[in-house]
Structures are given as C-alpha cells and as structure tokens.
C-alpha cells in the first residue's frame, strides 16, 4: 500500500467525527428550545387542563334566543317595536306576550328591558357572572338557566352562585312582578225614581174598607153595560192612597168620573181613582206606595160618595182588567 493511501483514511474519520459532533450539538440546542416552548404554553394555559380553560363565547342557546328577543332602547314604544320587528298582532300581541316584563301599563317601558318577539314571555336580562377559577369550578357546578315561562311565576327560586361577586350581582337584579288582574266592575243601571218601588215593591189598598160593587157587574147605569172597576163605600174626605210607586199621568176633571187621578205603575199598568172631592198630586209627579193622592168625594156621575177604582193596561177608558185579582197577586186583598 502506498503512502498516499494511508493518509486518506484518517481524513475521512475526522470528517465523520465533525458531522456527529454537529448533530449532537444541534440536538442539545433544540432540546432547551422545545422545553421552553412547552413551558411557555403551560404558563399560558394557567397550569389548567384543557377542559377547565374558559372560552369567552356566548352559549348557542342564548344566541338562538337573541334572534327572537328585543332589548328596549331610549325612545322606544311597543307600537314602534311591533312595527319595526313585524310582530303579528301588533303592539297588543307584543304587550300580551311580555306583560310580566312590562307590567300593567303598556305605555311605560324602560331601556334595557328584554322583550320576546316569538310569542313567549322574555325572561329578565341577567348580569354576567364573574369567571370562576379552577378550584371554584371543581367545587360546584353552575345551576342550569331556568326555562322561560309563559306565565309570570309568583315564587322566585334563588340561583346557585359560586362566588361573592356573582351573588351580589344576582341580588341586585329585580325579579319580575306578577301582574294583578283588574277587578271586574258590574254596571248598575240607573232607574228613574218614578219606576222604582218602595219597601220591596209593596202594594197597599187604595182605600179603607171592603168593596161593595164588584168588577164587571152588569147594569144599565154604566155606558159599557158593566162595571169597569170596583167601588169602596167611603165618606167624603177619606184619604186615598197610591197602591204602588209610579208616576201621575193625569190629575183633573174626568167628565163622568168627576175629579180623577191616573197613575202609571212600575209594572206598566195604570191605576185610576174617580169621584174625588180634592186632588193632592199633579201630572208628572212621582209617588210612592201609600202616598196620599187625594180625598174621596161624590163628583161626576154618582149616587153618593165613594171611590171608583180601576186597573187598566193603558191610561184610557176601555182597557180595564180585574182590579181585585191584580191587587191579590201583589198581596192585597180587598
């Protein structure tokens, strides 16, 4: 072997050793860089597992719900919101769905109120809770948000809190007030005084004593061929009474009936008093049961003092009905 061949081999070994040394040095340099990167990543993660690292993102449920809600701003009215958001049923439907939030007055809404646009009552807006640490998360799980109720709840359940800051924020948030339905109002009809009756619709006899000549007694003394009323044989000057409450429709000379008074009673019937010596009431006057309407006498076509009394369906002659049966039906026997 030549001398030149002997010197080439050592040169190759030297080159190999240099390459190996460079590779080891590169690995040594890369190791601390990788460790430092891993250490930096651990510090940025806050030495917490990936499952415990909080992510500042709104829950999907809240994002979906927000598409159907509206937050009131200054200058808003229910009418403006309903028109701008195309609410079916207008502001009345919007108010009905959010009455638990708005309260009893639809004209009084406040900036910041959360209104539902999808037919369900919106829940009051909640203040964001402070971020909890890994130890707080491990100690207690946050309570699930309650589902919005279609009717305002009277009983409010206190939410589970994980720290002092969250508790103070939730205590400051006002609970929605349950609306109180307005009490029903019953209209009371106003009845004219002339149409009312006193003492529970009391009826009285028109004159004292018993009847001498009954109703529909036949005879030539009467133009109709029969007696159209009943007669009370009372002396001149006897007080005569209104049989029930009513209104005087006529008071004066009645021809063959002499001085007469006709009263329209509350039930629509008419009472006639004839042959009076004096009259105590006037047309249009309201009278009550038992009130004096005049004094008995013997005026007109008579043979002696008495009271001729009729019950009619109209104020005119010829519409007479049985006065004895009428008074008996109201508890008065004559």
Image (cartoon, rainbow, N blue to C red):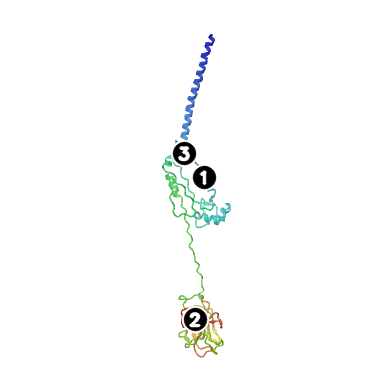
Q: Can you say whether 46 is above or below 109 in the image?
A: above
Q: Nearer the viewer, mark 1 or mark 2?
A: 2
* Circle 3 or circle 2, nearest the eye: 2
Determine whether label 3 and label 2 are within 8 Å by CB: no
**Residue of label 3:** 51
Residue where numbered disc 2 is placed? 325
- Say what secondary structure mark 3 lies in: helix
Vertical comparison of 245 with 67: above or below = below
Q: Tell me which label, 3 or 1, sits earlier in the chain.
A: 3
Q: Mark 1 = which residue?
A: 60
Per the image, label 2 sits on a secondary structure element best described as: helix
Residue in front for this viewpoint, 30 or 78: 30
Name the residue at the bottom extreme: 303
Answer with mark 1 or mark 2, whichever residue precedes in sequence: 1
> In the rendering, which numbered label is found on residue 198?
none
Label 3 – label 1 distance at C-alpha: 18 Å
Decide: few, some or many residues near mark 1? Use Cα within 10 Å; few <14, some 14-19, many ≥20. few
Residue depicted at x 54% and y 11%? 5
Q: Residues within 10 Å of mark 3 (few under 14, many from 20)?
A: few
Residue 140 drawn at (x, y percent): 42, 43
């Amino acid at each position: 072997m030549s001398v030149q061949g002997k010197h080439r081999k050592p040169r190759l070994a030297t080159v190999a050793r240099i390459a190996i040394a460079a590779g080891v040095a590169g690995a040594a340099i890369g190791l601390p860089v990788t460790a430092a990167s891993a250490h930096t990543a651990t510090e940025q993660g806050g030495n917490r597992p990936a499952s415990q690292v909080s992510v500042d993102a709104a829950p999907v449920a809240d994002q979906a719900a927000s598409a159907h809600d509206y937050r009131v701003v200054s200058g808003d009215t229910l009418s403006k919101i309903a028109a701008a958001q195309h609410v079916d049923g207008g502001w009345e439907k919007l108010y009905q769905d959010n009455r638990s939030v708005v309260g009893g007055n639809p004209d009084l809404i406040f900036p910041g109120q959360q209104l539902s646009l999808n037919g369900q009552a919106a829940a009051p807006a909640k203040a964001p809770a402070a971020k909890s640490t890994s130890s707080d998360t491990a100690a207690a799980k946050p309570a699930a948000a309650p589902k919005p109720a279609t009717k305002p709840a009277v009983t409010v359940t206190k939410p589970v809190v994980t720290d002092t800051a969250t508790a103070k924020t939730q205590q400051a948030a006002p609970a929605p007030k349950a609306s109180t339905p307005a009490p029903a109002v019953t209209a009371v009809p106003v009845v004219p005084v002339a149409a009312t009756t006193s003492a529970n619709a009391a009826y009285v006899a028109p004159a004292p004593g018993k009847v001498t000549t009954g109703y529909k007694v036949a005879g030539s003394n009467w133009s109709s061929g029969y007696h159209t009323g009943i007669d009370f044989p009372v002396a001149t000057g006897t007080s005569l009474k209104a049989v029930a409450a009513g209104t005087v429709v006529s008071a004066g000379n009645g021809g063959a009936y002499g001085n007469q008074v006709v009263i329209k009673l509350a039930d629509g019937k008419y009472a006639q008093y004839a042959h009076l010596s004096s009259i105590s009431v006037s047309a249009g006057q309201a009278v009550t049961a038992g009130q004096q309407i005049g004094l008995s006498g013997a005026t007109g076509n008579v043979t002696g003092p008495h009271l001729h009394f009729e019950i009619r369906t109209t104020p005119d002659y010829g519409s007479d009905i049985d006065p004895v049966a009428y008074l008996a039906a109201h508890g008065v026997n004559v």
